[in-house]
């Protein structure tokens, strides 16, 4: 403001100097000319001469001319001082063209508009502005074109500049194709852990996709490998067992790599019906001691007891049903254990199991004095042999082994030789002779199994 006042003061000073110059160059000559004319007239000449020669009259004429000149220059100076510019960012670009027949690429979503004019005019322009940048493509055909953007300016005294002011667009003819819909259920983890999605049905089996057939276009419908209906079970307000209706299901087109393809899908959304059920079953628990071969010297596990023998599991129908023939393994690390101990362990949730009735259980491991027995003639089986290959043991007695079983007397008395297995793993081995380790396992988890024959030679040949 100080700078502005100083500028105006300087301008007024200049005006005073100009007024004196006008008085000398314009007013005085005019006065003399008036006197000359008055001499040529009749009696009134004396009166006019007398009036014009008065000092007050000369001052009045000079002041009047100076004021007129001052107001003219001041008005022009105010116009220059009040001139300003303002940028309207991210104004929506609206294109006019036949959207049913053509696809246009290269259109910006927004443009910046710079308004230039007096402050008061800029204010009105902002209030009356439509805020829209337009581009007319209605007369364009297929191909590449350079077109200008326009702004709907409401005040003629305000000029504008656009960024960008012109754009290059590619116009393609629109084509269509029919695609089947596949279903993708999302946000299953937002369901109550006791609930499972049994089935999903849609009110449509296929949709129409619209785009271009130009390989260079990002809207090429040939890139569409699948159209998925994204069924969001998390959008169901209060999911319960039975029929549930999620919000309108969005359709998305994907290429073979799983990337979204920008094509038009008709309709944009479909309706879905989600059948939700609660699948549960009773599953057995089996404790698996780890590090049983590293118990304190002379000790072995005599018994294992748990706070519960079965738990209720909830999850997918197929997973839940599978536990009717198996069990939930719970591992307990007994490495270095020298006396009986009670553990608190977390019940694991395998794939397909979302909830269990018991998150943790207690496991009591009781120790006793270790004894051992030998179980002879356990057959050694080969596992994981590659296709079109066969294997045979090299050397006498290489196809069988004696197994040493360590445990308490009560455990050893229950050992059944048919539950002991000896194997060699041949995965990744090809033709030729190989030395492989013998691994022994048994159904009795409280016992420790060791083969007397720790490794054998095998010959692998083509079948």
Image (cartoon, rainbow, N blue to C red):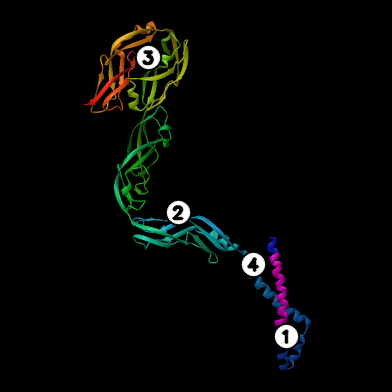
Circle 3 residue? 445
| Label located before the other in sequence (2 or 1) | 1
Mark 2 vs mark 1, foreground winner is 2
Query: What residue does disc 2 label?
Result: 109
Mark 3 vs mark 1, CA separation in Å: 132 Å
Residue 454 is marked as none
For the residues labelled 1 and 4, the Cα–Cα distance comes to: 33 Å
Q: Residues within 10 Å of mark 4 (few under 14, many from 20)?
A: few
Q: Secondary structure at mark 2?
A: loop
Mark 2 to mark 4: distance in Å? 38 Å
Provide residue 195's location: percent of width, then percent of height: 39, 28
Helix, strand or loop for disc 4: helix
Q: Residues within 10 Å of mark 3 (few under 14, many from 20)?
A: some
The residue depicted at 41 percent of the width and 19 percent of the height is 330
Q: Earlier in the sequence, mark 2 or mark 4?
A: 4
Quadrant where the N terminus sits is: bottom right
Q: Which stretch is magenta? A: 6-27
Judging by the rendered image, the residue that carries numbered circle 1 is: 31
Q: Earlier in the sequence, mark 3 or mark 2?
A: 2
Residues at discs 2 and 4 in contact (Cβ within 8 Å): no
Between 430 and 31, the one lying in front of the other is 430
Residue plotted at (30% across, 45% down)? 179
Q: Nearer the viewer, mark 3 or mark 1?
A: 3
Residue 221 in view (yes/no): yes
Closer to the eye: label 3 or 2? 3
Real-space Cα separation, disc 2 to disc 1, in angstroms: 69 Å
Mark 4 = which residue? 78
Q: Position of residue 191 (x, y in %)?
A: 42, 31
């Amino acid at each position: 403001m100080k700078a502005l006042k100083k500028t105006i003061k300087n301008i007024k000073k200049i005006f005073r100097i100009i007024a004196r110059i006008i008085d000398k160059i314009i007013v005085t000559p005019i006065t003399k000319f008036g006197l000359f004319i008055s001499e040529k007239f009749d009696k009134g000449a004396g009166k006019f001469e007398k009036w014009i020669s008065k000092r007050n009259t000369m001052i009045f004429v000079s002041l009047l001319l100076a004021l007129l000149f001052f107001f003219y220059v001041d008005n022009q100076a105010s116009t220059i001082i009040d001139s300003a510019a303002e940028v309207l960012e991210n104004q929506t670009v609206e294109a006019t063209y036949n959207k049913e027949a053509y696809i246009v690429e290269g259109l910006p979503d927004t443009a910046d508009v710079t308004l230039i004019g007096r402050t008061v005019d800029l204010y009105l322009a902002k209030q009356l502005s439509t805020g829209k940048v337009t581009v007319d493509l209605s007369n364009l055909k297929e191909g590449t074109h350079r077109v200008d953007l326009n702004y709907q300016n409401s005040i003629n005294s305000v000029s504008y500049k656009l960024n960008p002011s012109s754009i290059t667009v590619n116009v393609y003819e629109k084509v269509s194709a029919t695609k089947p819909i596949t279903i993708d259920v999302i946000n299953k983890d937002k369901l109550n852990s006791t609930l499972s999605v049994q089935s999903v049905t849609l009110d449509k089996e296929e949709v129409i996709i619209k785009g271009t057939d130009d390989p260079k276009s990002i809207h090429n419908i040939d890139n569409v490998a699948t159209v998925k209906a994204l069924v969001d079970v998390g959008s169901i307000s209060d999911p319960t067992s039975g029929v549930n209706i999620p919000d309108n299901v969005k359709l998305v087109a994907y290429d073979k790599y799983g990337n979204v393809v920008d094509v038009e899908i008709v309709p944009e959304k479909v309706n879905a019906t989600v059948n939700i059920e609660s699948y549960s079953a009773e599953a057995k628990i089996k404790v698996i001691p780890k590090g049983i071969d590293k118990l304190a010297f002379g000790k072995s596990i005599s018994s294992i007891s748990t706070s519960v023998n079965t738990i209720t599991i909830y999850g997918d129908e197929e997973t839940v049903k599978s536990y009717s023939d198996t069990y939930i393994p719970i591992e307990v690390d007994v490495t270095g254990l020298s006396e009986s101990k009670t553990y608190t362990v977390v019940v694991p949730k395998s794939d397909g199991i979302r909830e269990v009735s018991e998150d943790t259980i207690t496991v009591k491991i009781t120790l006793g004095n270790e004894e051992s027995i030998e179980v002879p003639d356990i057959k050694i089986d080969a596992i994981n042999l590659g296709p079109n290959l066969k294997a045979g043991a090299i050397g006498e007695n290489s196809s069988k082994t004696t197994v040493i079983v360590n445990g308490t007397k009560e455990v050893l008395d229950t050992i059944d030789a048919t539950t002991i297995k000896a194997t060699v793993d041949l995965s990744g081995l090809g033709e030729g002779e190989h030395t492989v380790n013998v691994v022994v396992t048994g159904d009795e988890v409280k016992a420790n199994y060791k083969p007397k024959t720790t490794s054998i030679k095998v010959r692998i040949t083509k079948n």
